Image: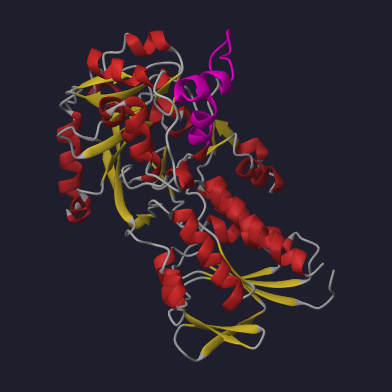
């Protein structure tokens, strides 16, 4: 390991940038780390609000335990005693103006148990028979990348895709699955189908057997005080790093083997041996605007979404179903796309005798909804919810959060374009690394993995 002190500048103070700074600081490498964040707070889309005894997430509310990086980071920070697991319960699809329980024994909407699928009220018999043709259809002929929609429609038919798979996947990627890259999102489904000549059979053979006794364990984790306590823990741990908030990186230029990072205009400069850019790609390409190859990754603009958190007294809602929430089939005449009954999924967030719900709006053909006022968005959410449940009181409070250009779209060919971008980056801008939800995964653990990969490359180059 080189004893020479290296300067590392991290652009962006969301979870990706904070994770990179933390693991650089705890590595054996002799570094001086400077993290630069444009806004006045750290954490990016992670924002937790406390109000009247409620804990409300305005951005992501949890992370998958099976993607172990996030849980490991919490443990590394000495915060494992604050972890909370979600409560489980039925989830629903809103279709044909009623809530249908999602059939048991499915993986991302793909049936692995035939009986629950066959008796489901969500599909017509024609739709069910079309999906079961997967068992005899043979593998998909693939030359390069294809869309998620093309793949699932061929395997299972339009009805199952439109009523179940599309809303489930859009809950993760907030986009159009008929443009979404299969290779960048669900490559394991294609591998199973190619191996077994049937997606259903492949999942039946690879899915772990259900536990036969005891209550089903939740797959998601958060922290008792909300995800922002993870951001606070990282900030407190970064004692040897410089954290610059309300600081804008305007552009970066290469000077020999080093980089000049211009901040707050042209005069202020940070010098760096390494740069980790964790900003959204449309921001990153402006920072490196003199390099044409930076513009070639994104072929579709990021989507914008919003959510509305609403708190009620328990007796305000007369027929709330037993479950944790629902997503909306995409061909339905609703503005909301999903709703979580937060008080059931995360009981610790809500005082006794109260209800906390979070509804989501904004989809590729309805992003103008974000331009409405808070009251207008709240009204359309309430109007939609009243179509499926009886709500006879106004909420105790409501909280509207907008996320503009928040969700990158991994369109067909995304990984190929990303590989080409990273190749040109290594040729023209060595020691500059890209990480974050624009590239190789949108969830919190995915972003952390990318941060750690960048840190490992920096450390290895100095060993």
Relative to 35, 367 lies left or right: left
Region rendered in magenta: 188-216
Give yes or no for residue 213 being in the magenta stretch.
Answer: yes
Q: Nearer the viewer, residue 306 or 354?
A: 306
Relative to 303, 43 lies left or right: right
Give yes or no for residue 316 being in the magenta stretch.
Answer: no
Q: Nearer the viewer, residue 143 or 115?
A: 143
Q: Residue at coordinates 16% horizontally, 40% vertically from top-left?
A: 380
Q: Quadrant of the N terminus?
A: bottom right
Q: Position of residue 206 (x, y in %)?
A: 58, 23
Image height check: is 243 above or below 443?
Answer: below
Relative to 404, 17 lies left or right: right
Q: Residue at coordinates 17% horizontally, 23% vertically from top-left?
A: 96
How has the structure been colored for display? secondary structure
Q: Position of residue 201 (x, y in %)?
A: 49, 19
Q: Residue at coordinates 39% horizontally, 55% vertically from top-left?
A: 408
Q: Position of residue 272 (x, y in %)?
A: 64, 79
Count of numbered circles in the view: 0
Image height check: is 366 above or below 106?
Answer: below
Q: Position of residue 73 (x, y in %)?
A: 65, 47
Regarding residue 437, the answer to whether it shows in the image is no
Image height check: is 263 above or below 225?
Answer: below
Residue 456 falls in image quadrant: bottom right
Q: Quadrant of the C terminus?
A: bottom right
Residue 101 falls in image quadrant: top left
Q: Nearer the viewer, residue 241 or 171?
A: 171
Regarding residue 434, the answer to whether it shows in the image is yes
Residue 163 falls in image quadrant: top left
Q: Nearer the viewer, residue 446 or 290?
A: 290
Farthest residue to the bottom: give it.
267
């Amino acid at each position: 390991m080189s004893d020479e002190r290296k300067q590392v500048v991290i652009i962006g103070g969301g979870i990706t940038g904070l994770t990179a700074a933390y693991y650089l600081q705890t590595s054996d490498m002799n570094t001086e780390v400077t993290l630069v964040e444009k806004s006045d707070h750290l954490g990016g889309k992670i924002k937790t609000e406390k109000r009247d005894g409620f804990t409300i997430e305005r951005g992501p509310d949890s992370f998958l335990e099976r993607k172990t990086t996030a849980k490991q980071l919490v443990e590394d920070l000495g915060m494992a005693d604050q972890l909370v697991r979600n409560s489980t319960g039925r989830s629903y699809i809103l279709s044909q103006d009623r809530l249908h329980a999602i059939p048991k024994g499915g993986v991302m909407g793909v049936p692995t148990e035939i009986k629950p699928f066959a008796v489901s009220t969500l599909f017509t018999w024609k739709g069910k028979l079309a999906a079961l043709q997967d068992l005899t259809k043979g593998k998909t002929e693939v030359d390069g990348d294809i869309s998620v929609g093309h793949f699932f429609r061929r395997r299972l038919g339009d009805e199952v895709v439109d009523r179940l798979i599309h809303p489930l996947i859009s809950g993760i990627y907030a986009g159009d699955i008929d443009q979404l890259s299969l290779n960048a999102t669900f490559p394991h489904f294609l591998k199973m189908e190619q191996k077994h000549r049937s997606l259903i059979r492949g999942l039946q053979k690879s899915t772990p057997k259900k536990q036969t006794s005891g209550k089903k364990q939740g797959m998601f984790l958060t922290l008792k005080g909300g995800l922002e306590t993870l951001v606070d823990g990282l900030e407190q741990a970064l004692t040897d790093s410089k954290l610059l908030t309300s600081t804008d990186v305007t552009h970066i230029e290469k000077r020999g083997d080093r980089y000049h990072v211009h901040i707050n205009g042209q005069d202020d400069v940070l010098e760096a041996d390494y740069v980790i850019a964790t900003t959204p790609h449309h921001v990153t390409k402006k920072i490196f605007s003199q390099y044409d190859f930076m513009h070639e990754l994104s072929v579709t603009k990021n989507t914008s979404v919003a959510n509305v958190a609403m708190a009620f007294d328990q007796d305000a809602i007369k027929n709330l179903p037993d479950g944790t929430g629902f997503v909306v089939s995409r061909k339905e005449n609703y503005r909301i796309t999903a709703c979580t009954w937060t008080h059931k999924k995360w009981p610790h967030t809500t005082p006794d005798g109260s209800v906390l719900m979070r509804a989501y709006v904004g989809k590729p053909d309805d992003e103008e909804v974000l331009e409405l006022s808070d009251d207008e968005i709240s009204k359309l959410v309430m109007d939609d919810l009243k179509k499926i449940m009886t709500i006879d009181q106004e909420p105790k409070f409501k909280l509207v959060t907008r996320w503009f250009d928040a969700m990158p779209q991994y369109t067909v060919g995304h990984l190929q374009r990303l590989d080409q971008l990273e190749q040109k980056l290594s040729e023209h801008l060595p020691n500059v690394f890209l990480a974050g939800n624009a590239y190789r995964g949108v969830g919190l653990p995915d972003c952390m993995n990318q941060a750690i990969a960048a840190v490992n490359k920096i450390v290895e180059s100095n060993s």
